[in-house]
Amino acid sequence: MTKLLDSIHSPADLKKLPIEKLPQLAQEIREVIMTTVGTNGGHLAPNLGTVEICLALHSVFNFPTDRLLWDVGHQCYPHKLITGRYPNFSSLRKKGGVCGFPDPNESEYDLFAVGHAGTGISTAVGMARGDQLLKRNTKVVALVGDASIVNGLAFEGLNNAGTLKRQMLIILNDNSMSISEPQGAFANYLEHLRATETYGEVKKKVQHLLEQIPYGQQISDIAYHVKTGIKNTLAPGHIFEDLGLKYFGPVDGHDLPTLIEKLNELKDLDAPAVLHIKTIKGKGYEWACEDPTTFHSPKPFRVEGCRVVLEKGSGRSFTSAFADAMVNLAKKNEKVVGITAAMPDGTGMIKLKPMFPDRYFDTGICEGHAATMAAGMTKAGLRPVVAIYATFLQRAFDNIFQEVCLQNLPVIFCCDRAGLVGDDGAVHHGFCDLAFLRSQPGIVLMSPSDERELVHSLDLAASLDHPTQLRYPRDNVPATPLGEDSPWGIVKTGGISRTLREGTDATIIAYGSLAAQALEAAALLENEGLSVAVIDARFCKPLDGAMLERVFAAGVPVITVEDHSIVNGFGTAVVEHAQQHRYDARLVTRLGLPDRFIKHASRPEQLKEVGLDPAGIVRSVRIAIDETRTIPHEAAAVKRTAPQMR
């Protein structure tokens, strides 16, 4: 049987379909999304909930001439399927395939590469103002969902959108969920709106009641005051109205005829407006609706009748290791509290909730608030551990600078997804946290290489009187510890590193989880007759000065390895240290993420692409050894020192 979806090559084809055919198309889209995500993994429940609104938007508006701005880009799969990417959709999130987020390099229908929440309204306001100044007659739509409306930038955008003197439509896709349950007072307000009759419905009922009463001036006055009272007190959405935005809804986000009718009504409205739609996360599959958190972004799965079996990964993740370490830390220290910003499952912080519910806090998609709240809690005498993905930490940079580091408060930031994250791609790589955190005076930066090291680093962080960060990847911990257990601590010469392997021809200094790849590379080089030492740095700030003195004194190549941008990362810190102490910085080869954005693929494929897999490290070590032989022996071998900086 021929699918309707086979005939949809662009929104122009969609517009040719009679409206009564759209429910069939919606079901076909859901089946393709379910099948593809079941095979590749990806964002399932959010996309199942946005099918009808995508069809309605592309039926009414003329994208890409009109503007469609996404707020949480992971809800864009239906949009991709009707904008020419259906033939390649089976490659979703695979190397060289369809991106799991909007991507302007992929299609003219995608205006921004977007994976972080809260930005859609502001970019929409910017495009609306730009088109107005350039005399373009375009419509602008921002699609906001998965509780990202609570983000601070979203409120900033709303505040400014209300001053527009032209059309702009904000679609509030309210599925009463974030990645997990939404948090905060505004989420409760939206829940109230979902259960509230619209102003139009209430007004119709009141008008019908008044029509049954003999009409007179007195009743007319009463009617006026009743309607005014309804608008001011009973009508939903008055917060938006007070901000200067016309509010409509809530309406059923799965009722295609109503959605299309409402969008046609609002398309030419010469004022900023909010259309509040109610959708069901996981729509179309009961098992996804019943557990939208699990099926927000599942691993590959298979459906067996009414049962869904998720693919189980082998090994134990750094996330799971952190979750257990966090619970144990809370057991040992009653002042320890856990904070997450809408990522309780992804960070592992969810494990703390049933154990210590009064010491667990989810701020919603509000990383800046999470960091600043942690500062306040620390000032009050608590020891907060803030678990935020490395890719989201920069959203809180000013808060970390002003409220945490400037005050020298011992807040602990635990950053999962540090470095390359695999199939989520460029929008989610945690590649720049060291670059901005290294600039903060007094902060301690650590990266454990295995589970035992993670436990020790978290314990050390809890004992320090300074801000700290721990970073670890979206990967498994090594099956066995990488080396002998040795003390963690900070001494006069800096943080204490550990030597995993001795060697005389070169030294690899690895920061964090790539110590495992460095050890494997050293073993391969040994087969070639090269003796290479491997050091687990543990600390990026403060560096182990005593270790670096020994390493540079040997006069052999020094190769730094990190899962972070090569710009201002761990390797840069080592070069700066060498220059400060008059060591020969020419000995240093820095390996890290290149100065470009890395596209989606599996994490092993990405590590190979950038030369951070064992084979890539081997190549770089060989080159470094060859190049160092050209440095004059005296310059390479003589130890140079300088007075310590005061």
Image (cartoon, rainbow, N blue to C red):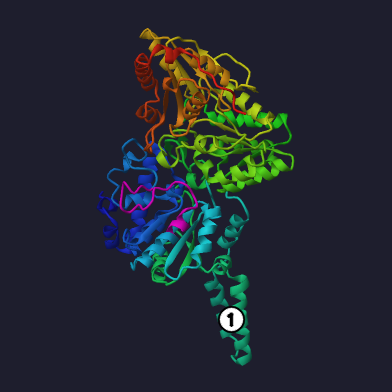
Residue bounds of the magenta highlight: 102-124
From the viewer's side, name the closer residue of 102 and 162. Answer: 162
Q: Nearer the viewer, residue 450 or 123?
A: 123
Task: Name the residue at 58% across, 58% down.
Answer: 191
Residue at image mark 1: 209
**Membership of 20 in magenta stretch:** no
Left or right: 159 in relation to 612: right
Q: Is residue 8 above or below residue 391?
A: below
Disc 1 secondary structure class: helix
Spot occupied by residue 289 in the image (x, y as percentages of width and height): 50, 48
Compared with 210, 44 (above or below) is above
Residue under the point 66% across and 43% down: 375
- Label 1 Cα neighbours within 10 Å, binned few <14 / some 14-19 / many ≥20: few
Q: Is residue 223 visible?
A: yes
The part of the image, by quadrant, that contains residue 381 is top right
Amino acid type, label 1: Leu
